[in-house]
Image (cartoon, rainbow, N blue to C red):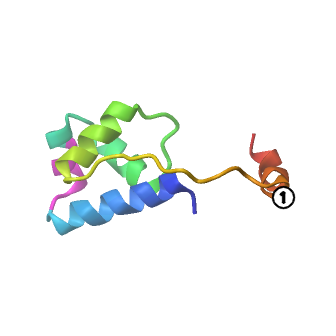
């Protein structure tokens, strides 16, 4: 699973824990409900980082970066077709 898919799952779990519908979270974030749904399902084609930040802030979270190290040659060969 990609880290973006993991992000979507986390957003969905956090939203449900607050008892919010997708429509409620969308209203609070100033977004369309379909944007929240696409974010949760990892089916969006393009979403701005500020929109993601707004959603996460409402859920009490933030984005962070972490060092994942350099990919191995095998890693690069496996993802070659993904470009």
At horizontal 40% and vertical 62% (from top left) the residue drawn is 9
Q: Is residue 1 above or below residue 28?
A: below
Residue where numbered disc 1 is placed? 74
**Figure disc tally:** 1
Q: Nearer the viewer, residue 33 or 71?
A: 71
Q: Nearer the viewer, residue 34 or 19?
A: 19
Query: Residue 63: where, in percent of width, then height?
Result: 36, 46
- Secondary structure under tag 1 reads helix
Query: Which quadrant of the figure contains the N terminus?
Result: bottom right
Name the chief secondary structure element in magenta.
Answer: helix
Q: Is residue 30 above or below residue 14?
A: above
Q: Nearer the viewer, residue 29 or 72?
A: 72
Mark 1 is surrounded, within 10 Å at the Cα level, by few (under 14), some (14 to 19) or many (20 or more) other residues, namely few
Q: Is residue 48 left or right of residue 4?
A: left
At horizontal 29% and vertical 47% (from top left) the residue drawn is 62
Query: Residue 25: where, in percent of width, then height?
Result: 19, 49
Query: Which quadrant of the figure contains the C terminus?
Result: top right
Magenta region includes residue 70? no
Instruction: Provide the residue span drawn in magenta.
Output: 20-26
At horizontal 48% and vertical 42% (from top left) the residue drawn is 44
Query: Residue 33: where, in percent of width, then height?
Result: 28, 44
Q: Nearer the viewer, residue 30 or 65?
A: 65
Q: Is residue 52 left or right of residue 69?
A: left
At horizontal 16% and vertical 41% (from top left) the residue drawn is 27
């Amino acid at each position: 699973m990609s880290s973006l898919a993991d992000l979507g799952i986390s957003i969905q779990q956090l939203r449900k824990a607050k008892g919010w519908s997708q429509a409620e979270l969308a209203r609070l974030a100033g977004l369309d409900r379909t944007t929240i749904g696409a974010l949760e399902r990892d089916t969006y084609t393009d979403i701005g980082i500020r929109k993601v930040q707004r959603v996460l802030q409402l859920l009490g979270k933030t984005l962070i970066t972490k060092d994942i190290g350099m990919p191995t040659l095998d890693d690069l060969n496996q993802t070659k077709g993904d470009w």
